Each structure stands twice: as C-alpha cells, then as structure tokens.
Image (cartoon, rainbow, N blue to C red):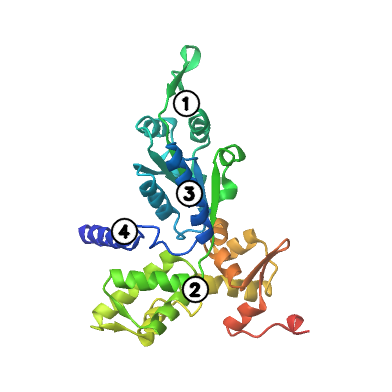
Amino acid sequence: MENQSNTDNNNQAIDVMLRPQSWETYVGQDKVKEQLFIMLKAANKRKEVCDHMLFYGQAGLGKTTLAHLVSKELNASLKVTAGPSLEKVGDLAAVLTNLESGDILFIDEAHRLNHIAEEILYPAMEARKLNLIVGKGPGARSLTLDLPPFMLIAATTRANLLSGPLRSRFGASFKLDYYENSDIEAILTRSAEVLNMKMDKNAVRILAKASRFTPRVANRLLKRVRDYAEVNSIQTINEGLIHKTLKLLEIDSLGLEPYDRRLLKTIIDKFKGGPVGVNTLAAALNDDKGNIEDVHEPYLMSIGLLSRTHSGRIATDRAYKHLELELPETKLI
C-alpha cells in the first residue's frame, strides 16, 4: 500500500510538472484564451472582481489548468473543491465563509453538486449573501451572512446537467473543444522536454494521432512511452518504440482502446450496425450509459466512427473499414 501511495504521489507530481504554468505554454483553445484575456484585463484595469466563469467540455482538455492560469493573471488565491465533496449545506457554507476578498473558488465536477447546496450558491453568486436555516421545526430561524467579493469558476463535463438557474448566473461560459493534431504535437514536444526525453518528429506525430485530441491522454501515453524506454535503456524515442508501446497498451493508430473497439463491434455484430438505443447498448455491454455518453461516444463521433441519430447509434462505414470488417449487403446497395 505504501509503494502504491508513493507511485500515485509521483504521478501527481509529474502531472503538475507537465501542467502549463503560463499562457505562453498553454497550447490551443485560442478563441477561449482571447475572450478570457479581455475579461481579465478589463477586471484588472477596473480593479474589480471578475465575473463568474463556467468551463465545460470533455475531460482532460485543460479546464483546471485554465482556472489556475486565471488565478495567476488576477494574482488571486485559488480555493479548489469538487461537486461531490459538497454533499451538505454545511460543507459549502464552510468553504464560502473561509473565502477572503478577491479569492477564486474553483468547483470541479459542478454538475454533481447537491441540489440544496446549489441553491445556496444563487444568492452567494448574485448578492454575495449566504442564507442559512439554523435549527429545525418551529424554532428554526434564517441567518444571512455577508460574503467578501469573490469569483466562482465552475468546471463540468456535463453542462446539460447544470440547472438553468445556475448556468444563468455565470457571467461567461467557455466550451473547450478537442485539440488539433498540431496542438497535441506541440504539447507532446514541450512535455518531452520537461521530462528530459529525446523524441524524433515521427514519434511525436504518431503519438499525437493516438492521443484522442486530448492533452491529458497525450501526456499519459508519453509517460508510458517513457517507462518503456527506461526499462529497455533506450535514449531516443523513435517511431518503432511508439508502435511497441501502443501495442503493449492495446491502443491502435487512432487512439482506440479495447473498450472502444468492443463498443463498435457490439453495434456491428449484435445490432447489424445500428441504429441501437444507448440504453440497449449499455445493457449489451453491461455498462452504464453515462460512461458511453461521456467518455467514449464523443471521441468516436469526432473521428467519424459513430453516428448518433434519433433512432439510436450507428456504426459508420469508416468504422467497418477501421476494424477491417466487411460492410453488410444493405450498405453496399
């Protein structure tokens, strides 16, 4: 258990090392950064607390990193928590009452906020008031506390699960999209330099293509390549080493993992390529539909292997080709 704890701590330390520490080293999301710059510079110029912000998009696209960079730009203290940690009203009240003027409160996984805790946020965000009910029954009384000026940054992978009243209280919402391959290559090049790894251009290109357009995935794969090179005493990472590492991890050239391929083959083999409803598909895979919708489906759709229609999910012609399967006769007509 102690060795496992040390390993986890080392991985976390490496992740912190690889996290961009400045706007110059944060690659991609140019439109988001441009809008952020204007908001932050205006707030600094007026010497005001910036409007509340919502970052949403798939996991690993840089929402937490952006929150850290915003806090640096505003020279503000960043207090980090997560939706599942704020189960009770008292949990959120404790966080809010510990804020100081100008602080930034970052709530990750905001879509998992308790409904009652969410309602506490409304007056806190709008009027900087904390409204509490003290006691129960006839003796209960309301208590209102003033909060210092603060900024809330919320991050979520499921913006559709946030209530309308909560979404409307953010001064700005930013959607983070998948990265371009060129951006992922730049991120991998920088990360390799941070880790003192030598990689040739072809190795960077192939690893970027398997990184699902996601910086977190790119850095995770890079760490596994680093492990393989270390064990085999290889000094320079080349194309061959990348292929060997990806084969060991059962990741193909497009970044598909075993579950992704199983999902597509289930649609093709059991449901003749679709359409099939997500609930039926989840039952066939013995999985939760949320895992399909949140983790796997977005990427498979982005690279054109899966199509989502009103009737259900369909494996595209490109999926058959990638999996080296013959198209059914109905698709050949």
Q: Residues within 10 Å of mark 4 (few under 14, many from 20)?
A: few
How many numbered discs, if any?
4
The disc placed on residue 129 is 1
Above or below, comparing residue 269 to residue 106 in the picture:
below
Q: Residues within 10 Å of mark 2 (few under 14, many from 20)?
A: some
Disc 4 marks which amino acid? Val
Calculate the distance from the C-alpha at mark 3 to the C-alpha at mark 1.
22 Å
The x and y percentages for residue 19 are: 35, 60
Calculate the distance from the C-alpha at mark 4 to the C-alpha at mark 1.
35 Å
Above or below, comparing residue 6 to residue 137 in the picture:
below
Q: Secondary structure at mark 2?
A: helix
Disc 3 marks which amino acid? Ala
Q: From the image, state whether disc 2 or disc 3 is nearer to you.
A: 2
Q: Earlier in the sequence, mark 4 or mark 2?
A: 4
Q: Which residue is mark 4?
A: 16
Q: Residue at x 41, y 64 (%)?
A: 216
Calculate the distance from the C-alpha at mark 2 to the C-alpha at mark 1.
45 Å
Q: Secondary structure at mark 4?
A: helix
Q: Earlier in the sequence, mark 3 or mark 1?
A: 1
Q: Residue at x 35, y 33 (%)?
A: 100
Q: Nearer the viewer, residue 160 or 139?
A: 160
Q: Earlier in the sequence, mark 2 or mark 1?
A: 1
Marks 2,1: beta carbons within 8 A: no
Q: Which residue is mark 3?
A: 155
Marks 3,4: beta carbons within 8 A: no
**Residue 49 seen:** no
